[in-house]
Amino acid sequence: MSNLLLLSGPAVEPLTLDEVKLHLRVDGCEEDGLLSACITAARRSAEAYLRRALIAQRWQYYLDDWPGVVLRIPCPPLRTVDMIRIYDGDGAVLTMDPDRYEVDCRSEPGRIAARGGIWPAPGRRMGGIEITFEAGYGTSWNAVPQDIRAGLLMAVAAMYEQRGATDGGLPPSIAALWSPYRMLSF
C-alpha cells in the first residue's frame, strides 16, 4: 500500500490573474477574488485529471514495502528526491545516503533505483518507507507547457462564465489539449 501527502503546494499558480483578466476581458478588481479561486480550482482539476504536478510542490510518499529494485514516483514530472527514510519496528529512522540510490528525473514518471539492487527492508509493517520529493514543471508559471496553460485558460473561462452550472465533465476541447500529458498509470 502507498500513500501520498502534499507537504507544500505551489508558490504560484500556472496562470497569472492579469492574463486571465485579459483573456476574459475583465476590467477592474471587483472579480479578482473569484478569478483567483477559479485559477486555483482549474489547476487542481488539471492536476487530478493529468495525474501530475504543474508547479513545483513538495510531497511525501509512504510505502509499506519496496515494489522492486526500481520505484516509480507519482506526480510527475519529478524534480528532486530530497530524502528517503526507512523506519524500523521501534520507530527509529534511517535516512538513506543518496549515494545508495539513483534518481531518474527524465523518465515519466520519475524513478529511483537501489544501487546494488537491494533496498533496506523496513521494520515497520505500515508506512515504513518515506520518500520526500519535489515534483512539477518548475517554480514559475512559464515552465508549464503551453497546451496545459491554454486548457487552464479555457477551464477558468468556463468556471467564470457558467458560475457552477456545468455537468462536471471535462470539455472535449480541453481534453484534446491535455491528453498528451495525462498519466494513465504509475
Image (cartoon, rainbow, N blue to C red):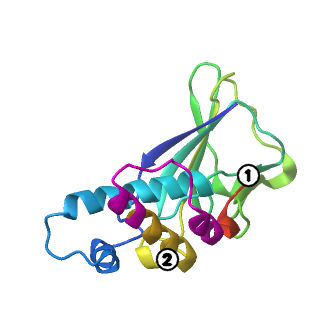
Q: Would residue 86 appear left or right of 154 to someone viewing this image?
A: right
Within the magenta stretch, is there residue 167? yes
Q: Image quarter for residue 47?
A: bottom right
Is tag 1's residue or tag 2's residue first in the polypeptide sequence? Answer: 1
**Residue in the picture at 35% in, 78% down:** 23
Q: Position of residue 155 (x, y in %)?
A: 45, 63
Give me the disc on residue 143: 2
Q: Which residues are magenta?
A: 157-178
Q: Would residue 77 appear left or right of 121 to someone viewing this image?
A: left
Residue tagged by mark 1? 72
Residue in the foreground of this view, choosing between 22 and 103: 22
Within the magenta stretch, is there residue 130? no
Specify the amino acid type for callout 2.
Ala
Q: Position of residue 45 (x, y in %)?
A: 49, 53
**Residue in the picture at 25% in, 57% down:** 34
Estimate the spatial distance between the alpha carbons at disc 1 and disc 2, rounded to whole Å.
Answer: 23 Å
Give me the disc on residue 130: none
Q: Would residue 81 appear left or right of 67 to someone viewing this image?
A: left
